[in-house]
Amino acid sequence: MIHLAGKSKTYTRYLLITVIIAAFGGFLFGYDQGVMSGAINFIGPVFHMSSGVLGFVSGGIPLGAFFGCLIAGWLADKIGRKIVMFVSAILFTLSGLGCAMAGSVAVMIVSRLVGGLGIGMVSTLIPVYIAEIAPKDIRGKMVGGYQLAIATGIFIVYLVNAIIANTHSMEWNQDTGWRMMFLAGMIPGIVFFILLFFIPESPRFLINKDRTEQASSILQKMSVSPKEEIDHQVQDIKTSVIAESHNKSFTKDLFKKGTRMALFVAIMCSVFQQLTGVNAVGYYAPTIFKNAGAGADAAMVETVFIGVVKVLFVAFFMGLIDKLGRKRMLKWGSYAMALCLILIAILFAQNPISKAFDVFIIVLIVLHTASFEMSWGGGTWVLISEMFPNRIRGRASSIASAALWLATYVVTQLFPIMLDKLGDVWTFVIFGGFCIIMGLFIQIFFKETAGKSLEQIQTDQKEAAAK
């Protein structure tokens, strides 16, 4: 038994180990998201790729993830969360091997799409799985652990990329180095697959499948609460499941009043997460640093520094999300990112850019990254995992996650075109404008969920819809 955040209430080590193992799937997400930022400079010349083809290779993960989300949600509600996570680990491992061994553009694209399927499954299921096992008072922190794993994966791959790129010749990197970057990604895939044997199925899924005794046993291992309290929790979940079972149609469940608004907010938040520009900036981070005046090697090292910033500020997010609430952190994070992006645009407008401005631009990119990780980075996954009824949580969450990945793909494709056609200034102004809209959206449409059980959130939605 251990204490969390200095609180008197305690939770078992079994629960925390389960959350850590599940959240590790986010490491796969982060690694694959960041690996192209190092490999992209070497792959293009090797396969003689045009900018359009290079953009499509970069976009292979989000495109595959879009379809992976849709598949995962349906499977998760049918056969369980855990089995689908096993499949995702296999797909990620195969993707790393395929990219490392690729002898043509076609093999590279297919391998990236396969990895995307796995990442889409992970991004749909892990936040849902953690939300379903986490106590309500620390649910945000625990789901935030998934974002911490993503940020750690990004940091590690930035570090791997920098070490490989800066310790070997250009010729070696074009022949072998980029392959090593992808090959190293097999390791977390294999580790995740093995670790999954040590975690249970989601108790809420088991109750939904009328396996109440098994679910109760798992909940008792995860909590030090008295058996009577666990029994009461199980009964609350069963009551919720029975209430939802009157509607056998997924479509009717999804579009009834309370759930319809939840779906709208979840999809918009998913799209908004990408309109911060953070993933687009991540894919092309070395190029942005180079444009700001840093050399190619310095740009790679500075990108590693951004990885450190991500990890640190996700940790801050985890400590605050349940105390300050989702709404406050998302709203003010939006406005902070808007300010950073607009200031970056103003600095890029100075021609020529002085060395002092180079430093300011890099500082603002770091502050933008910190603001993202303190708000929308983990906050989006927390929201998606909390907002839907037990019976359709997997499928409904998959729709919101698919919207996120579709937005990721579109932004990834458009970002280099925007830089080319509109220039640095207007590109960052546009993203800054979206951040302002995001803050206003949260203020108007989002209802706070911090400190509430998943069942209480559903009750609140029904009551709001009835008004």
Image: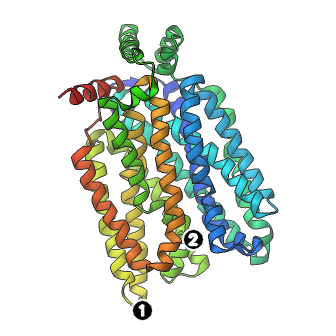
Above or below — where is 61 with respect to 381?
below
User: Where residue 461 appears, x then y in whole percent?
Assistant: 27, 29
Residue at x-position 32% and y-position 72%: 342
Per the image, label 2 sits on a secondary structure element best described as helix
User: Where residue 30 appears, x then y in whole percent?
Assistant: 56, 52
The disc label shown at residue 301, or none: 2
What is the basis of the colouring in this image? Answer: rainbow
Above or below — where is 75 with respect to 103?
above
User: Where residue 298 appears, x then y in whole percent?
Assistant: 57, 77
Q: Type of residue at label 2? A: Val
Residue at x-position 26% and y-position 26%: 462
Residue at x-position 31% and y-position 37%: 261
- In terms of depth relative to the viewer, which is nearer, 460 or 354? 460
Residue at x-position 49% and y-position 31%: 394
Above or below — where is 324 with respect to 128?
below
Per the image, label 1 sits on a secondary structure element best described as loop
Q: Is residue 305 visible?
A: no
* Picture quadrant where residue 103 is located: bottom right
Mark 2: few, some, or many residues within 10 Å (few <14, many ≥20)?
many
The disc label shown at residue 352, or none: 1
Which of pointers 2 and 1 lies earlier in the amino acid sequence? 2
